[in-house]
Image (spheres, coloured by chain):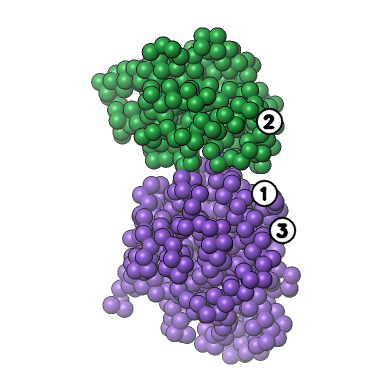
Amino acid sequence: MRQRGRFGDYGGFYVPEILMPALEELEAAFLAARRDPAFRAELKRLLAEYAGRPTPITLCENLSRHAGWPIALKREDLVHGGAHKTNQVLGQALLARRMGKRRLIAETGAGQHGVATAMMGALFGMPTDVYMGALDVERQALNVFRMRLMGARVIPVESGSRTLKDAINEALRDWATNVRDTHYLLGTVAGPHPYPTLVGEFQRVIGREAKRQFAARFGGAPRAVLACVGGGSNAIGLFKDFIPTKAEIHGIEAGGRGLASGAHGATLQKGTPGILHGAYSYLLHDAHGQITETHSVSAGLDYPGVGPEHSALKDAGRARYWSVTDAEALAAFRLLAETEGIVPALESAHAVAGALKLARRYAREAGLAKADWKKKLKQAILVGLSGRGDKDMETARRLFPELG
Amino acid sequence: MSDSRYAAAFARLAAAREGAFVPFTVLGDPDPETSLAVLESFAAGGADMLELGIAFSDPVADGPTIQAADLRALAAGVTPPVALEVLAEFRRRHPELPLGLLLYANLVQRPGPQAFSRRLAAAGADSVLIADLPPEEAAPFARAAKTAGIGLVSMVTPLTRPARLAAIAARGGPYLYVVSRAGVTGRDASLATTAAPLLARLRAVTAIPTLLGFGIGKPAQVRAALAAGATGAISGSAAVEIIARHAPAGRPGPRARRALLAELADFTAAMKAATRRGGA
């Protein structure tokens, strides 16, 4: 390895020896590609022509009026595939091709990363296997169908909590066995080095665009940027370019049934540092180091670990991490649909719920009447809307039976 | 002390022109009491040293057989302290047998490498192999193990490049765990052909004993491992499968328990017999 892959104390590469050559190969390919104008041009072309970038920012007038403070959305729900995941799979698929790999594997929770990887399998003509917890296969039937439609094989994982964590375990096992010709297209800024660095770099396009767009539309930087955090890739993508600005940075974790209930995914608030899936980072585990099971209404946030860069941002105090409950996220999910005609992913609904809380606090502190929200456009809250809610319609139908 | 048990065992085997047979089990599988009897069956069958897992919730380097063993032990309430009690009791009865542990980094990280290494030493362990700890990340763990008198075992694989192989061998330890093929633990129909060239490359750079693991479940595979140049063979999934068959849902009844222990002793004896060069 040329780099230590650390963010402060966090990160590293805690993997079985069999995977070390593949991580070294990936790091070398990434470092070389980053300097290669041809690679950068190809990625830029695909982001524009295939993924549909840049995505707009949308000022939500009705939602802002409702909250009493301006709220704008960075619209990753408009990326091809329906979520921010497409940004970084394009980069990784190009790297896989560059390394001469012939097969792709991936893990997925809510299915969005699986869908994005299936898209790459189709686009690049590579056989693709996607590991998915059996519980998530049930929760996200529509995305399972989409992956199969694009030619990917979806492998349900029955072990453990039957969610994302277990899918990652199986993907790592597959990779250890087939490492010579297979690229593991890891879905978030977690895992061993170089994944947190390279996924973060490929997702950085979100914040780079958002910063420019916000300045052009409202002037300056937003008062706060805010995103949901499971593994944390859409959040890191949005945050990175705002770290040197004055903007407050807020990461919203899955509060599940409440932090006191134990049924949540609030790794940064309730966890302590430990080692899982190749990295040293905050973790939900017991006193002996056994990983604890998590809960969230959103499959994409149902993970006991978190990307190491978030752990470093937390310790440094540069970002604040807090959570909203399942119930609060569902209320925000419905409110955004009703007020703006935008149906967010359940993950993204956590960010919207967080933004509403923050907006009300700002308005209260400023003594601002609700009708005057437009006076504060330069201090808007910018929310990373990481994906659209189409995949969650079955879950939502069960949760809101009164809508038929 | 740790090195001395291994050194004595390897010297004895070399003098007898035998290879080492090393069975693996997860401490506390299927329950602590039966697990202690499983260790006794290994000893009764003639095992030269034991490799013992501490159950972890997410054992990514292991295949489904050993993962299931981990989950059986966890379901039986086997925390690391309980696992080490089983180990300590066995150590009291067998003062000379080398005992190595195999576990995952977070079990060491959570209590802290120093505290955990002291506990291993107090329980009577000679060595530890941390499955998800490559040399680059090993320094704090290595220091703690050394202070506690525990040997830190390194792993090499068929994909390990020559320069890295030499660097890993130079780290020392009581033995090197040589992975026979790419992948996770589990039985294999045939021993991969990658083992012989890997062992030859190792021989050129180190005199540390080599134990070949992954996919070894039959006497013929033990013979093949020794013929390829290994000092000995580790067999994990095959022994664990025997436990799973007799005790699929945890603590077995008296009859199943007798059958389990007898089959494990027979298995161990057959595998051990295959280590006697020129003999059976």
Q: Work out whether residue B249 can be spotted.
A: yes
Kind of residue indicated by mark 3 = Ala
Q: Are marks 1 and 3 on the same chain?
A: yes
A344 or A328: nearer the viewer: A344
Kind of residue indicated by mark 2 = Ala
Cα distance in 3D space between marks 1 and 2: 19 Å
Q: Work out whether residue B96 can be spotted.
A: no
- Chain identity for the colour green used in the image: B
Residue B252 x %, y %:
30, 26
Find disc 2 in the rendering and name its residue.
B170
Which structural element holds mark 2? loop
Near mark 2 (Cα within 10 A), the count class, few <14, some 14-19 or many ≥20, is: few
Find disc 3 in the rendering and name its residue.
A316
Q: Is residue B102 left or right of residue B41?
A: right
Find disc 1 in the rendering and name its residue.
A1
- Chain identity for the colour purple used in the image: A
Near mark 3 (Cα within 10 A), the count class, few <14, some 14-19 or many ≥20, is: few
A177 or A313: nearer the viewer: A177
Q: How many marks?
A: 3
